[in-house]
Amino acid sequence: MLIDHLNRQLRERADQALTRTRRTAESPCAPQQRVAIGNQPSRDLLAFCSNDYLGLAHHPALVEALAEGARRFGAGSGASHLVSGHSLAHATLEAELATWMAPCIPDARALYFCTGYMANIAIAQALYAHDAIIFADKLNHASLVDGALMSKAKLHRYAHRNLAVLERQLMQSDAPLKFIVTDAVFSMDGDLADLPALLALAERFDAWLVVDDAHGFGVLGTQGRGSLAHFGLRSERLIYMGTLGKAAGVGGAFVAAHPTIIEWLVQTARPYIYTTAAPPAIAHALSASLQLIAGPEGEQRRAHLQALIHQLRGELSKLIAAHAHLGWSLADSATAIQPLIVGSNAAALALSAALDAQGLWVPAIRPPTVPVGTARLRITLSAAHSAQDVQRLVDGLAVAAKELHA
């Protein structure tokens, strides 16, 4: 019976410390949040787990832009983009995003999606044909993996950032269509792909480079224009996906590429064609977000975020050295994603619980999201954090280290 089968599977997950629990935030996305778990009373927690890297999710200008968009365009779009749901707000945002990406992709055109997951599935479904081969980093985000598996193309995976293996795979391929697919900033490790080297391989072997910049857009590069700008890249061979619910603070995603590629997505990408368009108010708020990101305030927020990253890494390095017996390690990351690798699932859960008891919200990340034996706390920093917030986290980890050792 299905229910009995699922209950057994759930018990097995619990035995492996793999059960996941939702928390309900009762206040806006911000470092200080009011949070409830199940039927327990809600509590105020200092959170280090959102992807709101610039602290814009509760920015007054974006809140007002969202309200203004709703007053102007209503609450919903009413239909898919190709029926009647494509509003002036969507069109304006896409034009702004195309201009945003033009320095990196000649004649860029942009297409807005409801989510980054949908955007990556759309790229795969529309472009990865039966005679294509996908070359993918093994630590790519689940949406990139799922898109590749759903497509008709053959999939070759290479060890994380191992370009020597990738080069051999490309040399051995005679496929007419080749796609190198990678995260720009890897979501669970925080490290960057070597995009210049990947683009050089794409150009050498007549391949396309598909870049998921979910965690770089808004944070990296001049004016926060993303990982391509960070590396100073420009090529017609780039297919770029950026999400707008992380550093941009609102929601949705976009694909930027050569105009012909975008037109093909419009005409054939099922995740775009067969879904209701996002509320126009969201697109309107995103236009305001782009202005903030590219302006002086965005620059100030990125500078503050970098200072927090430097502070946290320095303090954690000392803490790890002082408690070497625990076997903790800090991933090599220069981004807002700072993973503290603990090891076993149970150890990661215990550390997360010890922090929770101190009013600190840092979730444990376990397989299959990360490889077995590398369970971790995925610490994420936001420009909305203060130096005092970071110090409180470090102090909390020191307390937890002593408790767990005892």
Image (spheres, helix red, strand yellow):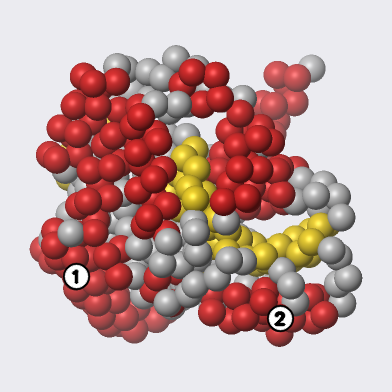
Q: Secondary structure at mark 2?
A: helix
Q: Does 169 appear above or below 252?
A: below
- Crowd tier of the residue under label 2, counting other residues whose Cα lies within 10 Å: few below 14, some 14–19, many 20 or above: few
Q: Position of residue 37 (x, y in %)?
A: 34, 31
> Residue 125: which disc?
none
Foreground pick, 124 / 370: 124
| Residue topped by disc 1 | 303
Question: Which amino acid lies under the numbered mark 2 shown in the image of this protein?
Answer: Arg
Q: Does 400 appear above or below 360?
A: below
Question: Which amino acid lies under the numbered mark 1 shown in the image of this protein?
Answer: Ala
Disc 1 + disc 2, Cβ < 8 Å: no
Give the residue at x 49% y 72%: 234
Q: Can the viewer see residue 219 in this picture?
A: no
| Residue topped by disc 2 | 204
Q: Position of residue 26 (x, y in %)?
A: 23, 29
Q: Can the viewer see residue 225 in this picture?
A: yes
Give the residue at x 19% y 27%: 68
Q: Position of residue 24 (x, y in %)?
A: 32, 30
Which of labels 1 and 2 is toward the front? 2
Q: Quadrant of the N terminus?
A: top right
In the rendered structure, the answer to whether residue 350 lies left or right of residue 120 reads left
Give the residue at x 28% y 60%: 381
Q: State which quadrant residue 72 falls in.
A: top left
Marks 1 and 2, how far apart in space?
36 Å
Foreground pick, 373 / 288: 288
